[in-house]
Image (tube, grey):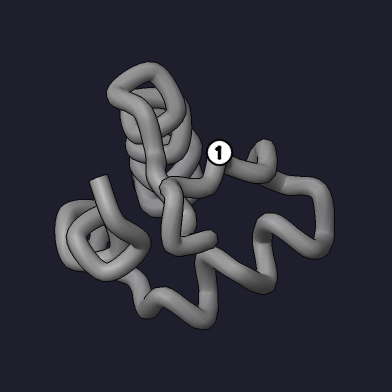
Amino acid sequence: MTITELAKRVGVTPKTLIRWEKAGKIRKPKRDWKGWRAYEEEEVASIERMVNSVYEI
């Protein structure tokens, strides 16, 4: 999954995901042959859980 697809899925911007990555809140994803971030389903699920726990009221 690309960073844009993941951002849409969890309701944040791609820049937010990059900031979280730099801050150590999420793991750095693998890169595809073009050097683009490629998120695996396990990483996506982890990020979704993190976002859902932050926005739970």
Which residue is identified by label 1? 30
Where residue 15 sits in the image (x, y, percent)? 51, 81
Indicate the quadrant containing the N terminus: top left, top right, bottom left or bottom right. top left
Q: Is the residue marked by circle 1 packed among few (<14), some (14-19), or many (20+) residues within 10 Å?
A: few
Query: Which residue appears farthest toward the front when viewing the image?
Result: 33
Where residue 14 sits in the image (x, y, percent)? 41, 75
Query: Which residue appears farthest toward the right when viewing the image?
Result: 23
| Foreground residue among 3 and 48 | 3
Q: Judge whether 47 appears above or below 19 on screen.
A: above
Q: Judge whether 16 appears above or below 42 on screen.
A: below
The answer to which image quadrant residue 22 occupies is bottom right
Q: Judge whether 18 appears above or below 1 on screen.
A: below
The answer to which image quadrant residue 43 occupies is top left
Q: Judge whether 50 appears above or below 18 on screen.
A: above
Residue at position x 69%, y 56% in the image: 21
Q: Is residue 13 left or right of residue 29?
A: left
**Residue type of the residue flagged with mark 1:** Lys
Where residue 34 sits in the image (x, y, percent)? 44, 62
Residue at position x 35%, y 34% in the image: 44
Q: What is the number of callouts on the image?
A: 1
Residue at position x 36%, y 28% in the image: 40
Query: Which residue appears farthest toward the top when viewing the image?
Result: 42
Residue at position x 29%, y 56% in the image: 2
The answer to which image quadrant residue 29 occupies is top right
Disc 1 on helix, strand or loop? strand
